[in-house]
Amino acid sequence: MAAVPASAAILLALLLGADKPVATRAAKVSAAPRTTGTVTGILRHKGCQSRAVGATVSVIGRDVEAASDGEGRFALALPPGSYSLVFRGPNLVPDQRVDEVAVALGQTRDLGIVEVWPEEHPQNCGAQPAPSAPEEPVVATAPDTPSLDLPGTSVAAGAPAPDQVLVRGSPGTAPGQFGLQGNPARDDEDALGPPSFAIGPQGSLFVLDALNGRIEKFDPRGRPAGTFALLRAPGVEPVVESDIAVADEGYIFVFTAGESPSLAQYDGAGKLLVSGVLPLSFKGVDLLFAGKLRPVFLMQNGQSVRAELGWGGLRAEGPFPGLPAGELYVQAERVSRWLAALRILTPEGRVRRSVQMHSGVPIVSVRLVGVNRRGEVVVAVDRAEGPDDQPPLAEVLLLAITPQGQLAGAASVPPGDRRFEWREFVIAPDGAIIQMQSDAAEVRFVRWALSPPPRGVLAGEGLVKGRVVEGGRPAPSTAVTVGRARRAVPVAADGTFEVRLPAGTYVVAFRAAAAPDGAPLEVKVAVAAGATVDLGNVALPPRAAAPGGGPAREPGR
């Protein structure tokens, strides 16, 4: 067994970061002013006088963050260098940033006013700010934020047809059987089954049968194709907290997340090639992936690490800002009960695109399944609904999303039913999704094809709609224009408007009829094909008082 050099373990621990709270590290930084500089600023909503209160300001590449106070002010202590600041928070377009912020030793870099894009027009917006200083305010750069309306307004999980079941195995130790423990149908918290499985490059199925201490292989048609034993010390109980991945070259990797995390590599015939203990920071691994490069560990914080064992010790790279997807990286998270987000980032951690996924069914969680061979990101969105006094109805919505933020395929499937779960879904070479289901009687591996959306939805336009109000009343005489498309949008008598636009990011301008030469109210909108972006009520800023102290009148009154 190859031992991991202590220097490599220390290096990887540094790469992954310590487990101390952010506030603790930030306090230590501020306690050593001689080695840092300071960045300050005031966050203000773009086009408004209102301040962005309670926003989070973080730094790409540094585990330091600050919150804006009641006046929108923030301060960060940082070592000398050039940084990118990221802004997130209430009613802000997510993952906005300001780049190339230079910090000098012992000095304060005051950014002044930093304008950040609001998601919705703030109620306390106030008038368009007049330039009061010769220096223009800093305007944060917002990533493209396509908006997808997830399919379905109620739980409607599909039932698999018999020809979708690739493998069906009963409890036992014979070929084609699996180790099972407990009965999930009786709310048995100790119900266990195979913790993980993988699909090889030729479509073969590899099942990590941990309770039986082996890996079972099935051919692409689901027929048993042999087993081999897992590495385990004599007398040691099987570790069910394990994951398996198969590389494009056929190598099999098994990660064990027990008290001492470890990694073992086998060849296609089941011969052990190398194994060893990993640093304790690998207890925070979510999933294991393997492609043409070294194994990729997806961590619980959304970052990833490439690491492999050899007879010379541990080789590690990272952390990276997410799961690799070509030259970019992806993260997925549940934002709220009705919203999930898929973030596409550069290697430097800058968010290039943030796909907002709006659901008509409450979202429980969202998980990354992986990246298919077409470069589409596959996510699993767990959704559930029902009365509080009854067991909820549940489904898993499988989605394939392009790097441009378009929906390429979807399927609604039932949950896997197991109490213990490490990996439930795997992407097959042809793009289908294989799901592991387990109950008290058997384990099933079901094949699901993601249905593409209608051609018109995939290649068509998105819809932007809303309602213009002024002083709480409809404002049908407002001029609404879309900048990049150079299109005027008609407004109905009740103030509502809608316009169809190709996928992309636009600035929609609202100009009050009583002030045709004044500065317009601008709203940044990201449109995805087939999706609807509802801006809700767009409130125009209050008009200036008319001469003589009376209120300004609308034309014709």
Image: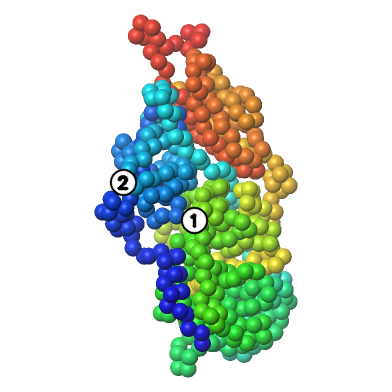
User: Is residue 233 in sight in this rendering?
Assistant: yes
What residue sits right under mark 2 in the picture? 106
What residue sits right under mark 1 in the picture? 333
Residue at 42% across, 12% down: 552
- Measuring from the top left, give residue 467's x and y in whole percent: 52, 29
Q: Residues within 10 Å of mark 2 (few under 14, many from 20)?
A: some
Give the residue furthest to the left.
31
- Of callouts 1 and 2, the N-terminal one: 2
Residue at 41% across, 74% down: 280
Q: How far, Cα to Cα, is label 1 from label 2? A: 38 Å
Q: In the rendered image of this protein, does residue 122 appear above or below residue 349? A: above
- Measuring from the top left, give residue 169's x and y in whole percent: 62, 81
Residue at 61% across, 78% down: 252
Q: In the rendered image of this protein, does residue 120 appear above or below residue 411? A: above
Q: Amino acid at mark 1?
A: Glu
Q: In the rendered image of this protein, does residue 522 appear above or below residue 2? A: above
User: Is residue 240 in sight in this rendering?
Assistant: no
Is 122 left or right of 477, judged from the image as shown? left
Q: Amino acid at mark 2?
A: Gly
- Measuring from the top left, give residue 437's x and y in whole percent: 58, 72
SS category of the residue bearing label 2: loop
Q: Nearer the viewer, mark 1 or mark 2?
A: 2
Residue at 41% across, 64% down: 17
